[in-house]
Amino acid sequence: MSVRTVLVAALIALLAPGLAAADKSAAGKKPAEKKEIVKVTAAEAAARGLPRYGVSIDVTGSGCTVARLPDKTTFLRLSGPPGGPLGLLIRSSRTASARPKWLGQLVQREVPDRGLKLGAKATLVVDGKQHPAIAYTTGASLARAHGCLIDAFSSPKQDGLLILFWISAGTSAHPGCAALARSGPFATLLPSLTIKR
């Protein structure tokens, strides 16, 4: 055996553990998921007759399908996969008549269900700002859902945004808006939501 062969064998023996560890490390890592950010610009919203807000949300890994500007009052509608209620809706708080003065009336207008039950009021943070919110439960059996309505940026002089999100409830009691915002896909969807005025 030549000196050169011996040296090459020794070098391979020295490097092999490090190369194996690097291979294992690379095998354990998942490739970075490409971010899927959905936007509606303020100009697009205004062109549809909506208040001039730009809305952006990161739906990466949420499993939701997204509809941009699906109707005259809605910026974005996210729907979860089949199997039970799951969704998020961002729409204008503008109304043809006088705007309701309390959150319960807003829910009753936005969620027209005879079995609607209002829950506790709360304050949730959206895009770094605190906004009033209210919990609700709607539907029955497999369609029963716990939801929350957030009234963002509304004032007597300014149209705001309503953010509604809901998830299958089963037979459980409503956990409250704060807990609901931390559950399922909302744990990443809501913190990623940005609103530009």
Image (spheres, rainbow, N blue to C red):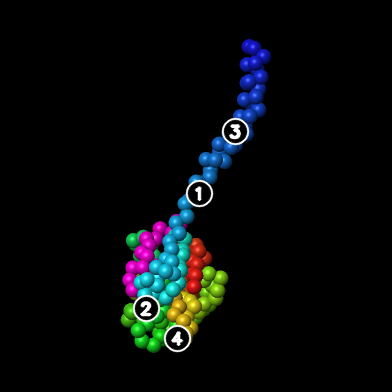
- For label 2, the SS is helix
**Mark toward the start of the polypeptide (2 vs 1):** 1
Q: Residues within 10 Å of mark 3 (few under 14, many from 20)?
A: few
Q: Is any part of residue 168 visible from this angle?
A: no
CA–CA distance in space, label 2 to label 4: 13 Å
Badge 3 is on which residue? 19
- Magenta-span inclusion, residue 72: yes
Q: Where residue 115 sits: x, y (%)?
A: 34, 80
Magenta stretch encompasses residue 5: no
Amino acid under label 2? Glu
The answer to whether 129 appears left or right of 6 in the picture is left
The label shown at residue 102 is 4
Q: CA distance from mark 3 to mark 2?
A: 59 Å
Q: How many C-alpha atoms fall within 10 Å of the one at disc 2: few (<14), some, or many (≥20)? A: some
Would you identify the image quadrant in which residue 18 lies?
top right
Where residue 94 sits: x, y (%)?
A: 40, 80
Tag 1: amino acid: Ala
Q: Which residue is mark 1?
A: 32
Image point (52%, 77%), residue name? 131
Is residue 157 toward the left or the right of residue 10 in the image?
left
Where is residue 129? Give x, y as percent: 55, 74
Answer yes or no: do the residues labelled 2 and 4 have beta carbons within 8 Å? no
**Residue drawn at point x = 40 percent, y = 58 percent:** 63
Lower position in the chain sequence, tag 1 or tag 3: 3
Q: CA distance from mark 1 to mark 3?
A: 22 Å
Residue highlighted by disc 2: 110
Q: In this rendering, is residue 81 above or below 19?
A: below
Query: Which class describes the residues within 10 Å of circle 1: few (<14), some (14-19), or many (20+)?
Result: few
Q: Amino acid at mark 3?
A: Leu
Residue in view at x 36 percent, y 72 percent: 48
Q: Which residues are magenta?
A: 60-77
Decide which of tag 3 and tag 4 comes sooner along the chain.
3
